[in-house]
Each structure stands twice: as C-alpha cells, then as structure tokens.
Amino acid sequence: MVKTINVYNPYDGTIVETIPESTLEDVDRAIEKAEKGKKIMAEMSLFERSEILRKTAEIIEKNKEDFASTLVKEVGKTIKEARIEVRRAVEIFKLASEEAKRIHGETLPFDSIPNGEKRVGYFIRVPVGIIAAITPFNVPLVLASHKIAPAIAGGNSIVFKPSTITPLADIKLAKALIEAGLPEEAINVVVGPGSTVGNAIVKDPRIRMISFTGSKDVGMEILKNAGLKKISLELGSNSALILSKNGDISSAVSATIKGGYAVAGQVCISVQRVFVQKEIYDEYLEKLIEGVRNIKVGDPMKEDTDMGPVISEESAKRIEEWIKEAVDMGAKVVFGGKREKTLFEPTVVINVPTEAKLFSKEVFGPVVVVNSFNKLSEAIEMANNSEYGLQAGIFTNDIEEAFYAIKKLEVGGVMINDAPSYRADFMPYGGVKGSGIGREGVKYALEEMTEIKTVCFNLRGGVE
C-alpha cells in the first residue's frame, strides 16, 4: 500500500492536497536517474543552461497567481507575502541565467616560480555532479530557487527534497523546469520524512554536494552522516537589531515590524531580539506597540491581511510555552501573547533574561524581545550572546558606531540602518557559528556548486 502525505492549510486545517510519500526505493531510483542527468548536464553548453533558466523565470511569471495562491494555502503566509516570494523566485532564475554565461576560470602564472619558465596554464570550473537540495517549509519557492537555479547554471543534476509540510509550490517549480527544457533526469523530486528519505539522500556516496536550509540540529546530523561531500548549511538564527540613541527611532520601529512579523516571524533572519539604548527606550517601545497594534491578523488569502497563522498548532503552543517561561523568569508581555489555534497575536516582550529560550533560541514565531542597554559595547555583547550568527542590524547615524558594530558583531551580514531581515538575492548570504557553513546568493552558490580543474602545459620548446 502506497503511503501518502496530506498537505494541510495552516489557517483552517483543511487538506489542500494529498501526495504520495517517497520510499527508499524511490530515493535510489531518483539518484540513479540523477547519475544519468549529471552526464547530460555536463555536456550542455552555457548558453543552453542559461536559456532553460530564463524560460523557467518566464513560466513562473506567467503562472504567478497560481504559485502565490499555492503558497498561501500550504504555508499560511499572506497573499501579499506570497506574491513577493514568487517575484523573488523569478528574479533568482533571471540572475542564474545571467551567471550561467559568466562561468570562467583564470590563467595561472607558472613562470613566476623557479623551474616554471616553460609552463603555461589556467583553471576552469566544472560541474560538481549530483547536488542534493533540501529545503524547509517557510519560504519554499525562494529557498528552492536559491539551490536549484545555481546548480543548473553550474551544469549539475539535482535530487530535491522539499519540506513534507509545504511541497506543492516546489513540485510546480520542478514541472516548470521541465517545461522550460531541463532534461527530466536533471531534476528528481522526492518527498518524505528527513529520518528516512532525507537520511538516505545524505548518506548516499553518489551525491557529491548537499545544500540544506533548516534547523541547527538537523544540520549537525547531516554533518555526521554525509561522508566525503561538499556541504552548504544555512541554519537558524535569533537575529538582533540594535538601536543607538544616534539612530532614527521611527525607521527602527518600521524595520522591527516589517522584519519581526513577516510570515508570522517564521524567517531565519526575522527580528527576534531588539536592544535599545536607555535614553530612547521608552519612546521606541511606545511607537513599536502602536505600530504592532495595527497589524491585521487573519485569513491570509484576504488582500488586507498583514499576518497569517504559524505553520501548526504544535508550533503555536511551543511559542506560548516559551513566552510563559520568560515571564516566569521576570520578563513582561507588553503586547499580544495570545493565540487562537494557529493564529498567534503579534507579540512584544520586554526585560527578557538571556537564559530564557525566548532570548537564546530561535523562536520562529511573531514575537519580538526588547531589552535596553547603556553603552553600545553592551549591546554588541548581548547580540553576540548567541549560538547563532546569521545577520544583525544596527540603526545609528554615527559612522564610528556603524564601523564598530561591523567589526564586533559575530554574524555573516551586518545591515546598517536596516533590519537583519534584509536580503538581496544576489548578495553572499550565510552565517557563522551555529548559523551554518558556506554562502548562498546565485554567484556565490554557483562557485560552491562547481569544482576547479587546473590545466598546465609543459612547453618543451624546440620549434624552429
């Protein structure tokens, strides 16, 4: 009997669609097929790869409302957020189409070393082979695009495991790729639990690279089980936003709201911890609460909804428990904190101890912690007091403070006068510490998804 997976709408609990659950035999067949696909892709010209990526962007654009409504139904994000995600996916494939034409090596100065006088050479970039792309539920289309588009640009084949919770838009993406001319052997989708399907992919020696986005715990398991493979891990965070007395309060409030409550706070670089200098703390908090009060929570398919549900009631209950723990430790909820099934009020909590999960872990929900500081060095120390280090933001009009923060913050990206949640899809993106290994962003992912092959000619001379 074939096992199936029900995909549920987080807002109302209805079944959106039922799909087959992949077996271990399906995984083996997918990798076997990808073995054929990698040979086909390696022979494909840069122009052909570029054209496939360009046409994929056009197909996604043509079907943008279908993609958007699918994202709303399976993820629970608002229709406005879903349309932004689809637009980003289109741009990622366009970027990859351009980068596919710019894969080149460079000459090497062999004659700059002793006994190298008669040697000339260069290096080129060649495909890695089979890349495993494993993605989470929260931004499924964009995160899949960030892995699949550069993999194709680099001439690789892909075994793709989307989240079992939100696989539908990603399955549509795979169909769009084939419609655009990608050989069927080059994109192989399997959907099933990480403990079975995911592990089988990770351990298989035919897979040459794993590109994973998800939790730190799962990332650590991948590192243990992968063997001799290239690894790219984009893991969690509890991103900090710092507001200096020299920063613009209104801009910081706007960035906190936009960065803290988008997709109900379920983004790796969501604003989770805010540190405000004491002189302006009360003013910031007052304006923040006023702004959060205006966030409209409800049916994500409605055009005027600002925030939809979290992914499941289990997740909502966990967020509720973390808030209670923080309050028991001395924190105070100044706005929100209540839930109705999967709908969780946008919440602001102050004076949260560093030992509380709400401060030290990734909440992945619509909760922003606001604590105060005296000196900027204290804020930096609190921001760095984390197992994570993905991105951080600081609001200041003092150039010295900005450069001090850039130097001292232990993160992969520092946003000046912006939220840590800002990401341009072309920029190098990734973290330090428990936030991962490697960088995404089309150009930078493409570098990791190709191998360097060195070529050297020994010119013996003797030609008359």
Image (cartoon, rainbow, N blue to C red):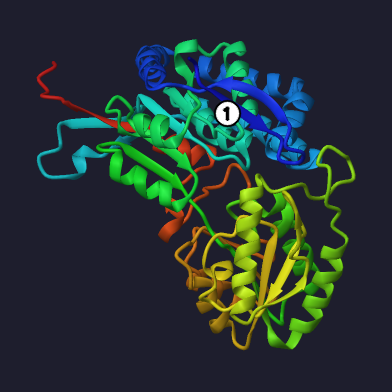
Confirm whether residue 104 shows in the render. Answer: no
Residue visible at 77% across and 30% down in the picture = 69
Amino acid marked by disc 1: Glu
Confirm whether residue 78 shows in the render. Answer: yes
The foreground one among 56 and 188 is: 188
80 lies left or right of 434: right
248 lies left or right of 266: right
Residue visible at 72% across and 27% down in the picture = 67
The foreground one among 408 and 336 is: 336
From this view, report whether residue 434 is shown above or below residue 81.
Answer: below
**Quadrant into which the C terminus falls:** top left
40 lies left or right of 120: right
Residue visible at 47% across and 19% down in the picture = 188
Mark 1 = which residue? 98
Q: Position of residue 216 (x, y in %)?
A: 44, 52
As helix, strand or loop, the secondary structure at mark 1 comes to helix
Q: Position of residue 64 (x, y in %)?
A: 76, 26
The foreground one among 434 and 190 is: 190
Q: Position of residue 132 (x, y in %)?
A: 42, 30
